[in-house]
């Protein structure tokens, strides 16, 4: 299958014998992915890396910013792959997910000449040395971190084929490319998502497929309890990847996070404006979130704004 319409080499600093890391993004998310790329390089200056960036589209400004990183770090190569979206147009989506959740499925096919690849979500930043994760390559098709999924949801999945815990998060996946291709993962995931009503479509399908074929990684490689880090700084000890799961993201004003802000301000995307609350529902979410992380003055302020807007029946 012709998953890619074009490939473009953006940065070439070394020979190809190095680790492989892949990101997937639509045009609107490239800038957030760029911060993740920058954070990996900032924490791994002596590791040679091949970045493989899968996109539906990318603007010239973001291409130039990706190129500009090589003036700071010269230990990486970067290629852009333009996705043929026809394969994903009719797949189910839900909540805050788009069809971009399925793009990771094609990576091993496109990079079939590589033994393995590390896939990383766009809402993740790196806080440490990633080299040890590549020691986790095994005979299993995927290596990943256990998810924080509820037991109630797991019991629902059990009714359609998921029987063996733990359930993993697909935000960081170390993939054995050869096995992925041999198992026809792309076709099998598409069949499962089209014939089931999954809450987390690609992730649920992958967990069903790999329940006997997975290697569980330490949680430091995909730390998801990011809201706890506002109060407990010790959680950063030995953390490699910090994953901003959920609908609230660190590029939204109500989701500003000191670690993400640090790398954003160092990166070529430092001029990005945080997304501000706009709707009445946004202000309610802001109030609840600030209260949850202990910022009570902000929580009360946004609660008042929410109540006023609700009384005025503003959207």
Image (cartoon, helix red, strand yellow):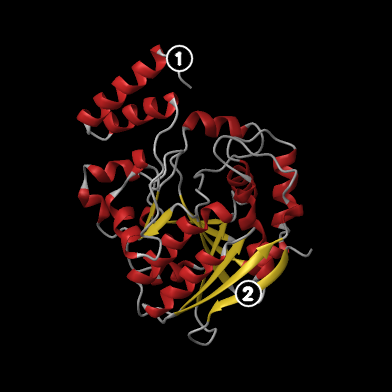
Q: Quarter of the image containing the N terminus?
A: bottom right
Q: Are there few (<14), some (14-19), or many (20+) residues within 10 Å of tag 1? A: few
Q: Nearer the viewer, residue 168 or 213?
A: 168
Identify which residue is drawn at 26% across, 54% down: 236
Identify which residue is drawn at 57% across, 58% down: 24
Q: Secondary structure at mark 1?
A: loop
x and y percentages locating residue 48 in the rendered image: 44, 80
Residue 157 lies, with reference to residue 216, above or below; the image says: above
Identify which residue is drawn at 61% across, 57% down: 104
In this view, the residue farthest toward the bottom is 15
Residue 253 lies, with reference to residue 236, above or below; the image says: above
Identify which residue is drawn at 52% across, 84% down: 17
Q: Nearer the viewer, residue 177 or 61?
A: 61
Is residue 14 left or right of 212 when viewed as pictured? left
Image mark for residue 8: 2
Is residue 29 left or right of 249 when viewed as pictured? right
Instruction: Determine the image quadrant of residue 75.
Output: bottom left
Residue 82 lies, with reference to residue 210, above or below; the image says: below
Q: Nearer the viewer, residue 284 or 291?
A: 284
x and y percentages locating residue 102 in the rendered image: 64, 51
Closer mark to the observer between disc 2 and disc 1: 1
Is residue 126 left or right of 121 when viewed as pictured? left
x and y percentages locating residue 292 in the rendered image: 29, 31
User: Of marks 2 and 1, which one's residue comes earlier in the chain?
Assistant: 2
Q: Are there few (<14), some (14-19), or many (20+) residues within 10 Å of tag 2? A: few
Residue 138 in sight: no
Q: Which residue is mark 1?
A: 313
Residue 234 in sight: yes
x and y percentages locating residue 240 in the rendered image: 35, 61
Instruction: Determine the image quadrant of residue 306.
Output: top left
In this view, the residue farthest toward the top is 311
Give the CA separation, mark 2 to mark 1: 50 Å
């Amino acid at each position: 299958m012709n998953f890619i319409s074009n490939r473009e080499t953006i940065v070439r600093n070394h020979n190809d014998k190095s680790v492989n890391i892949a990101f997937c993004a639509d045009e609107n998310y490239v800038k957030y992915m760029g911060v993740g790329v920058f954070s990996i390089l900032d924490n791994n200056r002596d590791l040679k890396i091949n970045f493989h960036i899968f996109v539906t589209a990318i603007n010239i400004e973001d291409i130039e910013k990706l190129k500009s990183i090589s003036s700071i770090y010269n230990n990486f190569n970067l290629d852009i792959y333009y996705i043929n979206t026809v394969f994903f147009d009719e797949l189910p989506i839900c909540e805050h997910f788009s069809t971009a959740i399925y793009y990771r499925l094609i990576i091993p096919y496109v990079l079939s000449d590589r033994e393995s690849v590390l896939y990383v979500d766009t809402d993740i930043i790196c806080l440490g040395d990633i080299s040890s994760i590549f020691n986790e390559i095994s005979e299993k098709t995927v290596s990943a971190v256990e998810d924080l999924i509820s037991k109630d949801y797991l019991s629902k999945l059990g009714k359609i084929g998921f029987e063996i815990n733990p359930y993993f998060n697909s935000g960081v996946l170390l993939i054995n490319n050869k096995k992925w291709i041999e198992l026809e993962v792309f076709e099998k995931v598409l069949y499962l998502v089209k014939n089931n009503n999954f809450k987390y479509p690609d992730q649920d399908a992958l967990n069903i497929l790999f329940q006997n074929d997975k290697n569980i990684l330490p949680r430091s490689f995909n730390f998801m309890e990011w809201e706890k880090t506002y109060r407990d700084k010790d959680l950063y000890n030995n953390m490699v990847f910090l994953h901003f799961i959920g609908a609230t993201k660190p590029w939204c004003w109500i989701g500003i996070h000191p670690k993400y802000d640090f790398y954003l301000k160092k990166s070529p995307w430092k001029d990005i404006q945080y997304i501000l609350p706009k709707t009445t529902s946004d202000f309610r979410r802001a109030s609840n979130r600030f209260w949850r992380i202990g910022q009570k003055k902000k929580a009360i302020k946004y609660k008042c704004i929410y109540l006023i807007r609700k009384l005025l029946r503003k959207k």
